[in-house]
Image (cartoon, rainbow, N blue to C red):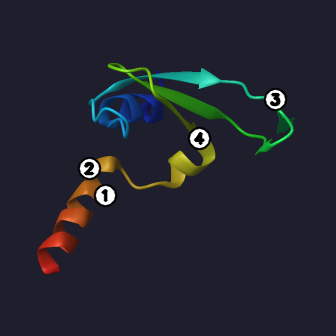
Amino acid sequence: MNPNKEALSREFVCPKCHGRGGLAEDVALPTGRLSGMLAVSRGRYIAVSCSLCGYTEFYNLAVVAHAEEPAKVKAKLAREAEQA
């Protein structure tokens, strides 16, 4: 498992049931339009499924690679909340 998948699995918090942790898997999505309504761009994706309820989110690896680490984001949000 690459570091991005490990971090996404470990840091995932389900927006549906608020469960923590998930299962991350590489996915291959077809390019073009899915079902005539969802446009999908080329690239590599990771699907993270909640380990409690199965809710799944898709992450574009190109975006994840440039994103800040989740711990840094949490610390930044905490500082901003203290200042408000």
Residue visible at 52% across and 46% down in the picture: 64
Label whose residue precedes the other's in the sequence (2 or 4): 4
Marks 1/4: CA distance? 18 Å
Q: Is residue 73 above or below residue 14?
A: below
Marks 3/2: CA–CA distance: 32 Å
Q: Are marks 3 and 2 in contact (CB under 8 Å)?
A: no
Camera-near label (3 vs 4) is 3
The location of residue 61, given as percent across then percent down, is 59, 41
Left or right: residue 35 compared with residue 49: right
**Residue under numbered circle 4:** 61
Is residue 30 toward the left or the right of residue 13 in the image? Answer: right
Sequence-first tag of 3 and 2: 3
Q: CA distance from mark 2 to mark 4?
A: 18 Å
Q: Position of residue 32 (x, y in %)?
A: 87, 39
Q: In terms of secondary structure, where does tag 2 sit?
A: helix
Horizontal side of 36 relative to 50 (left or right) equals right
Count the marks: how many? 4
Q: Amino acid at mark 4?
A: Leu
Mark 1, other Cα within 10 Å: few <14 / some 14–19 / many ≥20: few
Where is mark 2, residue-wise? Answer: 71
Q: Amino acid at mark 1?
A: Val
How far apart are the two marked residues, 3 and 4, measured between alpha carbons?
16 Å
Marks 4 and 2: in contact by CB < 8 Å? no
Among numbered discs 1 and 4, the one appearing first in the sequence = 4
User: Which element is circle 3 on?
Assistant: loop
Q: Secondary structure at mark 4?
A: helix
In this figure, which residue is indicated by the disc labeled 3? 30
